[in-house]
Amino acid sequence: MKRRGIFLALSILVFALIFVTGAGAAEEKIAKIAVYGPMTGEHAEYGLGFRYATELQVEKWNKQGGAGGYKLEVVVFDDKNNGEEAATIAERVVEDLDVVGIIGSYVSGVSMAATPTFQEAGLVNISASASHPDFTSAGDYIFRNNTVISVEGASTVRGVDKVLGAKKIGLLSIMTDWGRATAAIMTKLIEDNPNLTLVIHEECTDGSDDYSTPIANFKAAGVDAVIIVGMHNTFVPFARQYRQQDPKIGLAAFANLYDDQVLKLGGEYVENTVFPVAYFNESDEPNIVEFRDAFHARAGKNPSSLSAQAYDAAGMICEAIEKTKSNDRAKIRDYVANINYDGVGGEIKFDSRGEAQKVFMVLQIKDGKFVKVD
């Protein structure tokens, strides 16, 4: 009888421990934020920037106890800067009902291969970099924490006019959907500026390593400055090859150049380049200092303007979870659509098309540093 009593007591104790442990585990609710982009390959610095920024935002919330009663997790996907990969990732992501929002991808065309799936499944997608005019047209679950290229491009033109003082403009664009759409927009913006004349437009392959033909054509046309519609893998070699022949040629581009990698790879050949950004690391605002320092500790370099926009995108999703106390995708979407968010990129709110309204400043590379000039 004594042994039977001991056995019964032990059984009750084990059962109680299992019950308590199980109840505790069941109480922990998980909400996931996905991030996708090129985590490998020549554009990996952008995808990794999105990843680090999202992780930092989520870690900050988790240190405060999570959001809305949920522990937050980040899930990362490498789309290899490929539309087919992005579409496949989208199918996988929407099936995980713990995922309440996704950030990405980097290039507009790749992103737009995935947005129909996010829209159909009712999953909030916030891009930190897509600038194609049609990106948010996929539906009301698609948001852009960037601007359409016409807004950013207007600031590029302003820099060419007011900072560089150029008159005769050449335009170099990559042969992608984004490159062609952006080139058409830039053509009109240049033509609408009474101080500028578009003399010649050349196209090139994305990431080409030989720009001898367009450079020869620009020189023959007598341009004062060239606006490059492309990523750093186009801009840096083009700048190097052109500046080796003409050190004084003016150069201008877009916010994707605001990255320490451009300074490292471009060196003297990217000096005096102008481009617009909505975020600047040299600010002394406490939230920017905190983000910049944390990102530098994680990545070994300062955040880019696009990484900052990913950080704010993740912050908006976290706030939506906190305020709605829910992982319901529709509730998350409704909150984001009406948000007024104070981020490192300034005050963010979306219009009826899911477009963030932003103000751009013009930066110039001087003595190997990014300097605000307008």
Image (cartoon, helix red, strand yellow):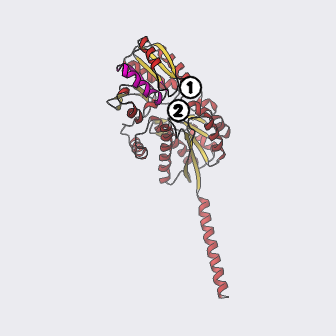
Q: Residue 80 occupies which quadrant of the picture?
A: top right
The residue indicated by pointer 2 is 356
> Is 251 within the magenta?
yes
Q: Position of residue 151 (x, y in %)?
A: 49, 25
Q: Residues within 10 Å of mark 2 (few under 14, many from 20)?
A: some
How far apart marks 1 and 2 lie (CA) works out to 24 Å
Q: Residue furthest left?
A: 367
In the displayed structure image, the side of residue 60 where residue 281 appears, left or right: left
Q: Nearer the viewer, residue 226 or 104?
A: 226
In the displayed structure image, the side of residue 252 where residue 146 appears, left or right: right
Q: Is residue 314 above or below residue 65?
A: above
Q: Position of residue 372 (x, y in %)?
A: 36, 29
Residues rendered magenta in the picture: 229-253
Tell me what residue is drawn at x 50 percent, y 28 percent. 207
Dot 1 falls on a residue whose secondary structure is loop
- In terms of sequence position, does the residue under pointer 1 or pointer 2 come before the other? 1
The amino acid type found where label 1 is placed reads: Thr
Tell me what residue is drawn at x 42 percent, y 26 percent. 275
Q: Position of residue 167 (x, y in %)?
A: 40, 13
The amino acid type found where label 2 is placed reads: Ala
> Is 291 within the magenta?
no
The residue indicated by pointer 1 is 176
Foreground label between 1 and 2: 1
Tell me what residue is drawn at x 55 percent, y 23 percent. 175
Q: Residue 354 occupies which quadrant of the picture?
A: top right
In the displayed structure image, the side of residue 113 where residue 242 appears, left or right: left
